[in-house]
Amino acid sequence: MKLVKQAIEIVDENCTGCYRCDRACPTGAITMVGPRKQEIAVVDNDRCIACFRCIDVCDDDAMLAVERDAPRKVGTNAKQADPAALAALCERAGLHPNQVACLCSSTKVKELAAAALAGASTFEELALATGAASGCLLYCGVPMRRVLHAHTGADDTTSKVRRYDSAQVLLDIDEAAADAYPLFNLRAEQAAARAKQKPSTS
Amino acid sequence: MADTLSFDPVVEPPEVMPTVYGPPPQTVRGRDIPGLVSVRVRDLFPDIAAAAYQGGTDASAIRLATEAALASVDMSRIGTDDTVNLLCSEHGFGMLGGHAYAEMLTAIRDEVIARTGAKVRLVVIAWLGAKEPGELIEYYELDRRFEGKVRGATPMDAGIPIETAMGTLYGLRKVYDADWIIHAHYDDPREIYIHRAIDRITKPFGMSYARMETRSIFHITMGTRSGNFIGRAIADSEFVRSKLAFSATLVTSPDGVLAVDADNDLDAIGTRMTANILRSYGKMLALLRHINDCVAVIDGAKWPYYIHAGGMIFGHLFYNGVDWFDLDRPDTSFAVERAVAAGLSKSIKAVVLHQALLGLNFTSMAMLYPLVISNPDMAATMRHDFSNPRFMERALVADDLFQAVELAKERGGSDKVIVFDGSYGSLNVSPSMAAHLYELAPEADRLVEEELLPKWLRQRGIDPLTLDGAARP
């Protein structure tokens, strides 16, 4: 869940139509509008989760963060999902429901799963439904991909944001590799991971 | 009450680099807090190796050290027409003001060109912000130093698949799109709570040199020891082994830069690096772990966890509830974010946030301790921190640094102030903290020398003689 306190304003006269913001937005809130080679960015602030990635990639001072009149709450209540379906989805994803998926938005894996069960089927929809991917991006990529893949059975290929299909977890490392590198304690940590595989969604 | 006259005056911290990812550099610094003194790390622990370089723009000692280290490196595989990517990571510029790292990189470039005639390009890899690499390139004049052959990279840039022992992982294309790569690193232990000093040399292969997906695997699905397998798996891949010409590193202690080490053999330099980390930083870590109570002031040019005081980052204090070097300690959880929580400091009583970068989640700092932001610029920065959207709900904002420190001392019930301002060699502290550190040092010295260091080395299969190896000046 994330409380979105800012919105994005676009300075039209500064926008050069470079598309960089369009390709950086995690929720697809930005579209490029206008005749070919004269497009400028337009933002749908109902889809903005205040990650400010658009401001960061813009070299033309065309994006501004402004305070919203009232914060917008972005999130999905995991308690509203069917508990059995939620647990099953998390298990298929190979993730504990209570594991943090995104520190920046305080989103747990079970919230991602609940959002998927409620209809989110792309990275953009998952981000919009939970607030995940609105911060540092150091954590959320793998759990988002694994939940989506476990739910839809297919990889999301519609994203404008560049992504790669790589989402290994500890238990994916095979025994030969684990034994070849004893210093990394792989066997013991894998055993601990297996012991936690029967989760509670409370 | 400790007598201020019995301690050294404060030391000048490194300059703060201007950046769009933080407040404007503050002219009032932590060292200006009335009554502060400094404590030299080598007064606390005389056997911490003395630095050849402790900061400043004159880094000629680093050039000489780099040339000396490279003398034993075989560059015969690099052909005249070959391309070479010299890889650097942003944190190297966060050490001692960054000039040592910049000079080591420049000296490597000059030496490789002189000996091989190859085309050397610097790849400046920053964490996330699209503008970070450009800021580093401008501030350290890397464009001039590399005659225009420099480019930035972030983990959002195009990837390249690497087949490893844990499946396909993704590196950055900009890192690997040359005939050869040179791994130019530093041995600042940084996040010991995650890497545990077991394979520090390979960490950038799974972090700086990797795509965001690979970083996410590290942070979210692996443990504090198993996570390090990612960097090792990539470094051991045929792809990387076929491109890695050699590695070089700044060799440091809390006193500053001791030397430069370089080797064609990644494992050999890695073992020396691990041994030096344990030897050089173990006593200061033990010292920080035994601090009874303190107020920490964050005043530097990086994210809060990564700003130094006496060569030790704030994260070393923040997560210093346990001995992370001890590989026998039972891990309470395989998940990193839970495992590191086991080490949260109980000695920090309040935090003053004076200047630091945004973008890394550190809301827990404000949740755990009274946290006072010391100026309107920093407060404005935090209000727009996408990674800490609820930080300001828990932070107090003071009018200025001095008021913030007084407020933090009052809220925290401690007058022992320690300033994380980027300094190596000495810590800027209150007299009461100085006295406390001197009280604690003898036992920390004994503990590490007699019990911990032999154990740490034994756990890693490192011969204690390695401590006297080539990495030492």
Image (tube, coloured by chain):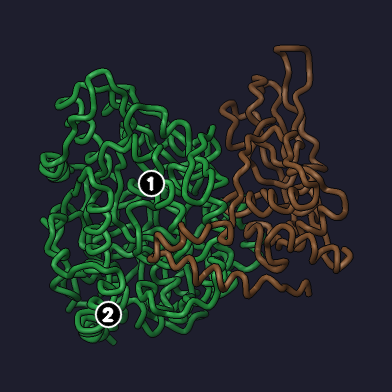
Chain colours: A brown, B green
Which quarter of the rendered picture does the C terminus of chain A lie within? bottom right
CA separation in Å, label 2 and label 1: 29 Å
Note whether residue B312 is visible: yes
Counting the numbered discs, the total is 2
Quarter holding residue A88: bottom right
Vertical comparison of B33 with B449: above or below: above
Vertical comparison of B383 with B339: above or below: above
Task: Say what amino acid the circle numbered 1 marks.
Answer: Ala
Residue located 55% across and 74% down the image: B333
Q: Which mark is residue B431?
A: none
Q: Nearer the viewer, residue B43 or B77?
A: B77
Instruction: Chain letter for mark 2, please.
Output: B
Is disc 2 placed on a helix, strand or loop?
A: helix
- x%, y% of residue A57? 58, 33
Tag 2 residue: B452
- x%, y% of residue B62? 16, 44
